[in-house]
Amino acid sequence: MADPATPLVVVAATANQHKLDEMRAVFGAAIELLPRPAEVPEVVEDADSFVGNARLKAVAIAEASGHVALADDSGLEVDALDGAPGVESAYYGGGDHDDAANRARLVSELSGVAVAQRTARFRTVMVLRWPDGREVVAEGSCEGRIGEQEKGDQGFGYDPLFVPDGSDGRTFGEHSADEKNVISHRSRACLALLTELGFTD
Ligand code: ITT
């Protein structure tokens, strides 16, 4: 699919600068991510799965740009909420990408739930799509639990509420960008993609 000696130039389907920064940090020189073309209309993400929504975004950008496109669809799955917010993560609180409202609803829904039952995971599914329809799919996840209150102001979205397993009890909101990228769902999906493409062993 790719020549490991040559950087793969890809148009990003994401409009989320935090995601772009996290992906670029992992891809390094292997994949050059160009910004999402401003003229492409927002994609309606109405699939019922992460891979479905990632594919909708990747196809839209590949067709509009004529270039290979990379989409990331991500979200949080909370076991005590039967996997919610899941694909509804971006608008769980009622607004559209209102991170504060999303976190407030999550805190409220989990009110009174014991620590042991607050298990959750972030998931990322990436679809790399060529204009001729070829594609590579890569996934990553990060297990953890949902804190009772927000802590930290790093990252974005649900980061101030998510305490990753194997860390020291800090939320992702209390992790530096580099620390988050060592263990995050997104960095794991990026590494899986690099492996699929032959950039790593
Ligand atoms: P796109 O342009 O790539 O679609 P988006 O922000 O709309 O960017 P998603 O559709 O994948 O992204 O929505 C995922 C939501 O899940 C996002 O709005 C965040 O609230 C949350 N989320 C995803 N990844 C996260 C992360 O690494 N840390 C915290 N929250 C995250």
Image (cartoon, helix red, strand yellow):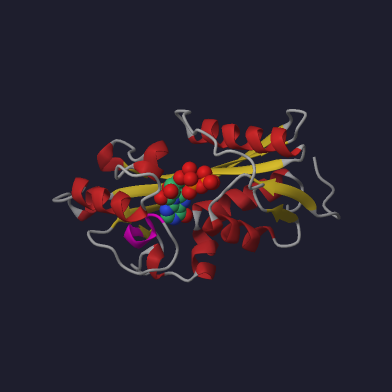
Residue 149, image quadrant: bottom left
Can you give x and y, in whole percent of width and height, for residue 23 in the image? 61, 56
**Residue 74, visible in the rendered structure:** no
Q: Which residues are magenta?
A: 157-162
| 90, 96: nearer the viewer | 96
| 131, 188: nearer the viewer | 131
Residue 63, image quadrant: top right
* Magenta region includes residue 33: no
The answer to whether residue 126 is left or right of residue 201 is left
Can you give x and y, in whole percent of width and height, for residue 126 in the image? 59, 42
Tell me which residue sits at (76%, 52%) in the image: 199
The answer to whether residue 191 is left or right of residue 10 is left
Tell me which residue sits at (66%, 53%) in the image: 35
**Residue 31, visible in the rendered structure:** yes
Kindly give the residue lying farthest to the left in the view shown.
112
Tell me which residue sits at (69%, 41%) in the image: 69
Looking at the rendered structure, the number of numbered marks drawn on it comes to 0
Can you give x and y, in whole percent of width and height, for residue 174 in the image? 39, 70
| 88, 200: nearer the viewer | 88
